[in-house]
Amino acid sequence: MPEPSAGHATTGATIELDALTKVYPGSSAPAVDNVSMEIKAGEIVIFVGPSGCGKSTTLKMINRLIEPTGGRIRIGGEDVTDMDPVKLRRKVGYAIQSAGLFPHMTVAQNIALVPKMTGWPKARIKARVEELLDLVGLDPGEFHGRYPRQLSGGQQQRVGVARALSADPPVLLMDEPFGAVDPITRDHLQDELIRLQHELHKTIVFVTHDFDEAIKIGDRIAVLREHSHIAQFDTPEAILTNPADDFVSGFVGAGAALKRLNLTRVRDVEITDYPTVTLDDPLQEIFNRLRGSGTNEILLLDKRGRPYKWLRRGDLMRARGSLARAGTLVSDTVTRDATLRDALEAVLTDNAGRVAVTGRRGEYEGVVDMETLINSVHELLEADRLDALEHQHELQELRSAQTHAEQEGAEGGSKA
Amino acid sequence: MNFWEYLSNRHQQLLTDAYQHASAVFQCMVAATVIGVLIGIVAYRTEWGASLATTATSTILTIPSLAMIGLLIPIVGLGVPPTVIALTLYGLLPIVRNSIVGLRGVDPSLVDAATGIGMSRLMRLVRVELPLAWPPILTGIRVSTQMLMGIAAIAAYASGPGLGNEIFRGIGSLGSKNALNQVLAGTLGIIILALLFDAAYVLIGRLTISRGIRA
Ligand SMILES: Nc1ncnc2c1ncn2[C@@H]1O[C@H](COP(=O)(O)OP(=O)(O)O)[C@@H](O)[C@H]1O
Ligand SMILES: [Mg+2]
């Protein structure tokens, strides 16, 4: 039997909600009222909206943790509205706030639950647990046998995601999964989720009330208002630059231009190459490179190729040729997956206005500086502005076409 | 004859009584645990179910034990049956109450998670809810056992087994030379048994409560 792995894992399936409605017993107004949407295979869709607007209810109807009172749900084209809910849920991963790990089971037991229920052979489950721990960035040897209470909030959340992915479901539902961790950990978890999704291409529906989180990880965002009515369902760029109405702009909040920085990643902008030397290079070689390079600064890498110190002309002289004392330590680096906002932050706090870009293991890849960033942001905003104009133009045409059709229709009606 | 001489003279009989006492309590505890946890499982979901179960089992406890056995004799006869029935009934309350408290105390988000990852109701109960409710249930079982140790002595009244026979014989022949020794031996025997059972429960707790939730 083939082991599931990131290479040939199940990828996403489409989700269609068709006039989905939920009226809780004893309440007159529907919590979710007539919601229809199509979610494409392999995309991350975010439900964002104020507390109590029906996000969780909508999400939980997809795996029928809450039974809809009206409408249909289709996953991968198959109508699952009346299917055995237990069977359905084993094909739909589910991750919740505070991870929801079972405290009396070890990390490995928690992750193994669904594969066990599905009847996988022991050896395959064991391999799968190790693989998943690795995938979510936890060392299998170290974390395998731990109990949830021996983990930090962020680690628990990672295990929660691993458990949701355990039986390799095409669809993943996440209800405010990072809501209960501190902001720095949340930021990491978001980055990890984005990285995971690059490998896995699942269809993910993710609920949050944090708009910044929504634009950071969503391919598309559904901004929901009361009764889960869809105020706007579009890409983060479109929602930021062209909010549908006052409710959406209220939700987007101030600083749309700054938020735009969250949507672009360092890999999308120009990374410049910088003259580098390594700790192993002889001192003479370092002097030569410093003198020979056009800039008045070079980057010193450590033995593993990671940025270590910025060296200026004269630094070495002042330190009398001692590499240990010369130069300024590299305080901050970004990866290619970092957002431009992270990069800008790093550049702003660096006194020389640049930051080193590193690969997955921290190895040097290039440098981004203030000038590059500002140029990129200008280009982005300009492109967005043009897109928005075009979008508006299309809408207007559509509207005038509709009015036209209606007028003709009305004429036709009066004739009859 | 002093107490020690009495003990060495009668140790065969005492050990038999103690064994029967322990065995009766143990068997009734197994029955009370199974029935009590089942009642708890049936009752914990609804408010009225929970209060019905708690009220019914605590009403049983208010019936004086002699009266209960007295009432049972005409129905099931003398000997082991009235003892077993009475003890099992008395043992229910702490177990039922703690099962309900324990099952209700399970974090609702864990129940949500269990259902959400595709557990059936039965599986959720067996794999998640009962293991998490087990520490309070075990406490209930412990309390029940201590209670039954004492109540079991009354069984001798219905010619039941156990150390109660020793005590009843003593009380019946008050003033005779061995009366006090008999009462003392029976009482001490019960206390020692209770301590041994308690030690056993500590061990059972160690073995059955997951390290992840042990205090
Ligand atoms: N089990 C329930 N019974 C009755 N009403 C509920 C239940 N769950 C949620 N609601 C109501 O439905 C509405 C939507 O809730 P929810 O979907 O949890 O919102 P959100 O996740 O967006 O905060 C709220 O008004 C809430 O009070
Ligand atoms: Mg919610």
Image (cartoon, rainbow, N blue to C red):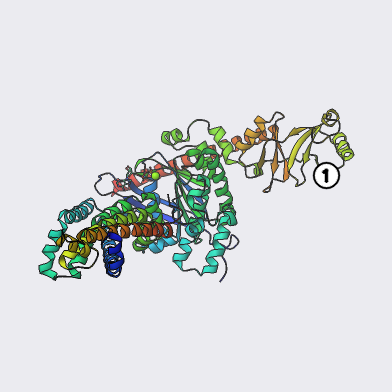
- Horizontal side, residue B23 vs residue B156: left or right: right
The picture places residue A81, in percent across and down from the top left corner, at: 36, 60
Front residue (pair A132, B99): B99
- Horizontal side, residue A225 vs residue B59: left or right: right
The picture places residue A44, in percent across and down from the top left corner, at: 51, 50
Question: How dense is the environment of label 1, judged by Cα within 10 Å: few (below 14), some, or many (20 and up)?
Answer: few
- Horizontal side, residue A107 vs residue B41: left or right: right
The numbered mark 1 sits on a residue in which chain? A
The picture places residue A96, in percent across and down from the top left corner, at: 44, 49
**Residue A312 appears in the picture as rendered:** yes
Q: Residue furthest front?
A: B1
Front residue (pair A61, A276): A276
Front residue (pair B73, B191): B191
- Quick check: is the Cβ at mark 1 less than 8 Å away from ligand 2? no
Type of the residue with mark 1: Asp
- Give the residue displayed 20% in from the left and 70% down from the top: B80
- Horizontal side, residue A52 vs residue A144: left or right: left
Q: In the image, ligand 1 is in what quadrant?
A: top left
Quarter of the image where one finds residue A316? top right
Could you tell me which quadrant the N terminus of chain B lies in?
Answer: bottom left
The residue where tag 1 is placed is A280
Front residue (pair A121, A249): A121
Quarter of the image where one finds residue A307? top right
- Give the residue displayed 47% in from the left and 39% down from the top: A210
Q: Secondary structure at mark 1?
A: loop
**Residue B39 appears in the picture as rendered:** no
The picture places residue A31, in percent across and down from the top left corner, at: 32, 45
Give the total number of marks visible in the rendering: 1
- Give the residue displayed 43% in from the left and 51% down from the top: A100
Q: Is residue B184 above or below residue A283?
A: below
